[in-house]
Image (cartoon, rainbow, N blue to C red):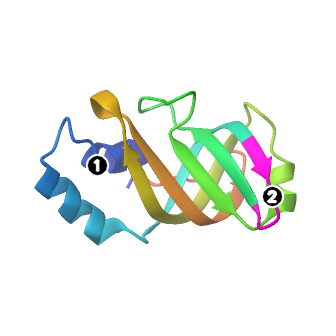
Amino acid sequence: MAFAQYASNLDLTKNTAVYTKQFWSKSVGSEHTWKGKVVYVKSGRRGAEVRVACPERMLYKGFNVILVTRDRLAAGKLKIGQEITFKGDVYSYKHKWSGLVIVYMKNVKFLGTGGEADE
């Protein structure tokens, strides 16, 4: 499932709270492959956090996906503005004003630039 479609299913301005809750309970933990642009990279003791902008949906402070990975070396090679393809497990999300959805992924693998994303 493409990121735009996935996020639309969590959008409370387009769906009821009941629908969103049912969709989330079925999809939490699911693995997806998406594309986006690197906005921010932060490394810590346990791994790295990468904020990514998937432009087909509204952005919050320039991003709408947060990736958590233990592979600090791979995250450290990313450059701001770089287009990447990544794969990971969805574990959380936040719904902001007017349909904005931020999706959190863990166990992320960076598949490089380009590549095949979910359709």
Q: Is residue 44 magenta?
A: yes
Front residue (pair 100, 31): 100
- The numbered mark at residue 85 is none
Front residue (pair 97, 20): 97
Q: Pinpoint residue 63: horizontal percent, then vertical percent.
A: 56, 35
Q: Is residue 39 left or right of residue 103?
A: right
Residue plotted at (70% across, 58% down): 111
Disc 2, SS: loop
47 up-or-down from 60: above or below: below
Which residue bears the numbered disc 1? 10
Front residue (pair 49, 35): 49
| Closer mark to the observer between disc 1 and disc 2 | 2
Q: Is residue 112 left or right of residue 59?
A: right
Q: Is residue 92 magenta?
A: no
Q: Is residue 79 left or right of residue 9?
A: right
Disc 1, SS: loop
Place residue 88 in its image quadrant: bottom right
Gap in angstroms between the C-alphas marked 1 and 2: 29 Å
Q: Quadrant of the N terminus?
A: bottom left
Q: CB of mark 1 within 8 Å of CB of mark 2?
A: no
Q: Pinpoint residue 76: horizontal percent, then vertical percent.
A: 85, 51
Of labels 1 and 2, earlier in sequence is: 1
109 up-or-down from 55: above or below: below
Q: Pinpoint residue 91: horizontal percent, then vertical percent.
A: 46, 65
Q: Amino acid at mark 1?
A: Leu
Residue plotted at (15% across, 51% down): 17
Q: Amino acid at mark 2?
A: Gly
* First to last magenta residue range: 41-47
Residue 13 showing in the rendered view: yes
Q: Pinpoint residue 32: horizontal percent, then vertical percent.
A: 48, 61
- The numbered mark at residue 44 is 2
112 up-or-down from 40: above or below: below
